Image (cartoon, rainbow, N blue to C red):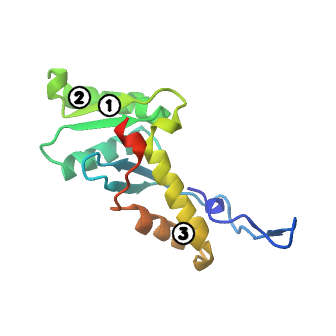
Amino acid sequence: MLWGDACGYVWGRKGEQIPIPVLNQKERQTYYGVIHYFTKEFILKPYDKGDGLNTVDFIQCLRDQFRGSRLLFIWDGASYHKCTKTQDYLNEINKGLEQEQWPVECLLFAPNAPDQNPVEDVWLQIKNHIRKNFMECDTFSQVKSLFESFGSGKAFDFSKMNM
């Protein structure tokens, strides 16, 4: 998420754009998010960037949260989902086990297919919520707080989750 996601322009009189100043477009926050398939709850965690180290940390946090459960991630083709660090971690925790016993299994959506990924719909709903309420936010910290309070723990249900 970028600070600019919450700001931009509005329309005034017919055909007239009214610019809204964006103070610092370089402020950013990376979020990892998953939808719990059975409860539809969205689980959100902020990170400084998307990379293999943070992907491994996010998987581990979910393993801790759902201790004893097998986890299946169906995710997009982000480079950090497929990178060596992530793959090494998955190979280590699944080592020596039959696939049906793996504690964590990961499948990929088809390449370039955001229309298959319900998390993309969650991101869009959260960003639209921010856009509707950005006037309440004077700082990027407030935008992040709004993002997290609207998205985290909320149940989302999209038809594509049943594909």
Q: Which image quarter holds the C terminus?
A: top left
Q: Secondary structure at mark 3?
A: helix
Residue linked to disc 1: 106
**Label 3 vs label 2: CA separation?**
38 Å
Earlier residue among tags 3 and 2: 2
SS type, badge 1: strand
The answer to whether residue 49 is visible is no
- As measured in the structure, the alpha-carbon distance from the residue carrying label 1 to the one carrying label 2 is 14 Å
**The residue under label 1 is which amino acid type?**
Cys
Q: Amino acid at mark 3?
A: Val
Residue contact at pointers 1 and 2, CB within 8 angstroms: no
- The CA span between labels 3 and 1 is 31 Å
Question: Residue 126: percent from the left, percent from the top?
Answer: 50, 60
Q: Please identify the quarter of the rendering in which residue 91 is found.
A: top left
**Badge 3 or badge 1: first in the primary sequence:** 1
Which class describes the residues within 10 Å of circle 3: few (<14), some (14-19), or many (20+)? Answer: many
- What mark, if any, has residue 92 been given in the picture? 2
14 lies left or right of 22: right
Helix, strand or loop under label 2? helix
What residue did someone put label 3 on? Answer: 143
Question: In the rendered image, which quarter is residue 4 located in?
Answer: bottom right
Locate the N terminus by quadrant.
Answer: bottom right
Q: Identity of the amino acid at label 2?
A: Glu
> How many tags in the picture?
3
